[in-house]
Each structure stands twice: as C-alpha cells, then as structure tokens.
C-alpha cells in the first residue's frame, strides 16, 4: 500500500496547485481531467503489479482511495460539460438551469438511496461484498467498469466515486448560484423595514427544511404548484437566512433512522400539549 498511498498524496498536492487557478477556465479543467486520468492509470498499474497485502487494504482502496481520484475525475468532467453547454441567457435563466441540474442529481441519488445511506453512515458489514474483487454480488445496473476491468474494480467502488463527485458538484453549483445572485440583486420590496425587524427562525435550518418539504408534499400552497425552490426563497426572505444546500439537507433527513420526521413530530406533540394545558386552565362555566 506504500506505493498507492504515495500516489494519492502526490495527486492531492497536484490538486492543490491547480485549485489555485480558476476552475471555470476550460483549459484548467482539461488539465485536471488529464491529471486524474493519469493517476487512475498509475493506481491501476500499481494494483496489478503489487496487489494488496490484506483484504482490509483492498477494501480501503476500493472504498476510499480509488473513489477519491475517480470521484474528482467525474466532478471535473461534469463541470467541464456544464461550462461547455451552459446557455448564454439571462442570470435568472442560468439559475434555473443550475437548479434543473441539481434536481437531476437528486433524482439519480434517490435511486441509490440504500447504498448512499450505507456509505454515509460509515457502515462496514457489507464491505467484503461491495469492495472486494471477485464478489458474486454484482450490481447489474452499474457494472460496466467491473466487466471492462475486473482487476481494478468492484461492484460498488464506482458508486462511491459518484457520491464523491455529487458532493463536490453540489458545493460548486452553490457557489455558482451565489455568484449569479450577486450579479442580480433584487431591490428590497420594503426598504423602510430593516433586516433586524424580520422575524427570526430560532429552530435549526434542518428543521425548517423538514417543514418545507412536508408542506410541499401535502400541496398546501397553491395546490402543490409551488416547487420547493420557491418555498425556500420565500422562507429565506421572510426570516432573513440562507438555507444553503437544502437538497443535501433533505437527503440527510431521509437518511435518519427511525425518527425521520423529528421536527414535525415535535410540532404535533407541542400543539397537543398546549391544547391539553389550555383545556385544563379553562374556567368551568356555571350552568
């Protein structure tokens, strides 16, 4: 593993050098794509020549080390594709285009939610099936790399790479949205009302996201014709906060254990408790 660890360290150093430049420059991105391909090839050669000293080393490689490089390769490729195909339209339409991309990512991730939860929860009980070569558990929906190069792939290492790429892309597009927002600042509809006078949301942002998705799921606003993005904007404006990556937050809520609707359950409990208290304090009328 010494050679592999050395290659990973070298790759990280190269990433730092390139990240000092502008990621939105096509030439810089192409260099990063070539760099990632080169290091993947070096890792492939090392694995074929040296193999692994133990099953735990093999699991570490296919669960963490290879997906780190492969995930960055996917990330740079996606950003490159986005920049090449980015529509030359108004700022608002560019934002809509990005949100459409994010929605697509969310749909793709939802199809793999069981494995995403397994990975995010740092589970290990299925590692010898997912991340050891020669496993009989091949995912036929995502096994192209396994059949192309079975010596350098397992049934699930590419899925980890997709998660790595997804997290990097979410961060990238959030910055893009922030930059586009700064280019088109909307006037304050009520300039006489200072920001400090806005009602403040004192529960967590995760709680607010949970509430937003619940309202969206019930179709309580305009018969469900208001999407989650519009609802989030309303809440951000109302409470003067930034919800950040609420897509990712929603994914974390879905990945909870038994108590997925923690905030909604607390709302129901608090209301019932208040009703009971009010009933207990009501004066008995004389008949």
Image: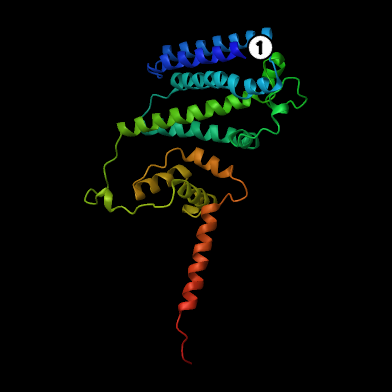
Vertical placement of residue 273 versus 125, above or below? below
x, y percent for residue 101: 50, 31
The front one of 96 and 178 is 178
In this figure, which residue is indicated by the disc labeled 1?
Answer: 47
The quadrant holding residue 46 is top right
Residue at 45% over, 83% down: 283
Vertical placement of residue 117 versus 193, above or below? above
x, y percent for residue 247: 50, 39
Viewport quadrant of the N terminus: top right
Q: Is residue 150 shown left or right of residue 217?
A: right
x, y percent for residue 254: 58, 44
Q: Residue furthest bottom?
A: 287
The front one of 180 and 5 is 5
Vertical placement of residue 12 versus 181, above or below? above
Could one spot residue 139 in this view of the protein?
no
Q: Is residue 119 shown left or right of residue 248?
A: right
Residue at 47% over, 85% down: 284
Could one spot residue 261 in this view of the protein?
yes
Residue at 67% over, 15% down: 152
Mark 1 Cα-neighbour bin, 10 Å: few <14, some 14–19, many ≥20: some
As helix, strand or loop, the secondary structure at mark 1 comes to helix
Q: Residue furthest left?
A: 192
The quadrant holding residue 29 is top left
């Amino acid at each position: 593993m010494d050679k592999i660890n050395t290659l990973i360290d070298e790759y990280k150093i190269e990433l730092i050098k390139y990240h000092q430049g502008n990621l939105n420059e096509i030439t810089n991105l192409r260099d990063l794509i070539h760099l990632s391909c080169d290091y993947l090839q070096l890792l492939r050669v090392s694995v074929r020549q040296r193999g692994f000293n133990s099953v735990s080393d093999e699991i570490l490689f296919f669960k963490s080390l290879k997906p780190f490089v492969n995930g960055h390769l996917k990330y740079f490729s996606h950003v490159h594709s986005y920049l090449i195909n980015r529509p030359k339209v108004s700022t608002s339409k560019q934002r809509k285009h990005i949100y459409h991309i994010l929605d697509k990512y969310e749909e793709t991730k939802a199809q793999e939610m069981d494995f995403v939860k397994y990975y995010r929860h740092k589970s290990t009980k299925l590692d010898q099936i997912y991340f050891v070569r020669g496993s009989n558990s091949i995912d036929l929906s995502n096994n192209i790399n396994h059949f192309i190069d079975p010596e350098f792939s397992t049934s699930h290492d590419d899925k980890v790479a997709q998660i790595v790429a997804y997290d990097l892309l979410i961060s990238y597009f959030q910055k893009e949205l922030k930059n586009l927002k700064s280019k088109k600042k909307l006037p304050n509809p009520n300039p006489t009302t200072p920001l400090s006078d806005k009602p403040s949301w004192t529960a967590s942002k995760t709680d607010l996201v949970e509430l937003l998705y619940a309202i969206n799921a019930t179709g309580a606003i305009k018969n469900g014709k208001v999407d989650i993005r519009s609802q989030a904007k309303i809440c951000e404006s109302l409470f003067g906060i930034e919800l950040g990556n609420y897509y990712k937050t929603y994914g974390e809520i879905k990945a909870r254990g038994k108590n997925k609707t923690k905030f909604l359950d607390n709302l129901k409990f608090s209301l019932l408790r208040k009703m009971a208290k009010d009933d207990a304090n009501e004066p008995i009328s004389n008949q």
